[in-house]
Amino acid sequence: MLEYKVVECSTVTDEQLEKIVNDFVRQGWQLEGIHFAMRESSKRPAMAFIFFTRQVGNSGSADSRTGGEA
């Protein structure tokens, strides 16, 4: 069974994105993609949503190392 994780990041810097990706990959998640929410008044993203997946057993019980925003 495939499990999904979405992490919201309101401080969109390369350092913060790297930290989130590295933290979740260490926990066994696989990066699927990053989507950016833009502001009309700026060329920089206002937010980022980082998507991860991982395989879990048939029982649906996931590893207890899941967390919120990093």
Image: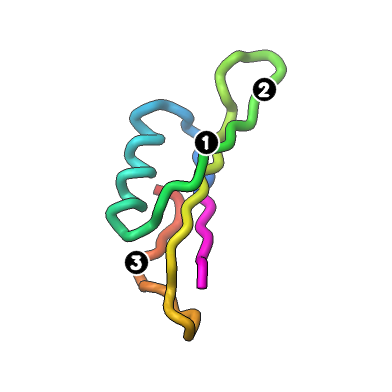
The residue lying toward the viewer, choosing from 51 and 41, is 51
Q: Is the magenta stretch mostly helix, strand or loop?
A: strand
Q: Which residue: 40% across, 35% down?
A: 17
Q: Give me the C-alpha separation between circle 2 and circle 3.
A: 33 Å
Point out residue 44 in the picture as x, y percentages from the top left corner. 56, 18
Badge 2 or badge 1: first in the primary sequence = 1
Above or below residue 44? Residue 53 is below
- Residue pointed to by mark 2: 39
Q: Callout 1: 10 Å neighbours few (<14), some, many (20+)?
A: some
Query: What amino acid type should be assigned to the residue bearing mark 3?
Result: Arg
Relative placement, left or right, of 67 versus 7 is: left
Query: What amino acid type should be assigned to the residue bearing mark 1?
Result: Ser
Q: Which residue: 31% across, 44% down?
A: 22
Magenta residues? 1-6
Whether 47 is among the magenta residues is no
Say which element carries label 2.
Answer: loop
- Residue pointed to by mark 1: 10
Check contact, mark 1 vs mark 3: CB within 8 A. Answer: no
Point out residue 58 in the picture as x, y percentages from the top left corner. 48, 82
Quarter location, residue 42: top right
Q: Give me the C-alpha separation between circle 1 and circle 3.
A: 22 Å
Check contact, mark 2 vs mark 1: CB within 8 A. Answer: no
Above or below residue 23? Residue 36 is above
Say which element carries label 3.
Answer: loop
Q: Closer to the observer: label 1 or label 3? A: 3
Point out residue 31 in the picture as x, y percentages from the top left corner. 43, 47
Above or below residue 49? Residue 4 is below
Label number found at residue 38: none
Point out residue 8 in the picture as x, y percentages from the top left corner. 53, 45
Check contact, mark 2 vs mark 3: CB within 8 A. Answer: no
Q: Which residue: 57% across, 33% down?
A: 47
- Residue pointed to by mark 3: 65
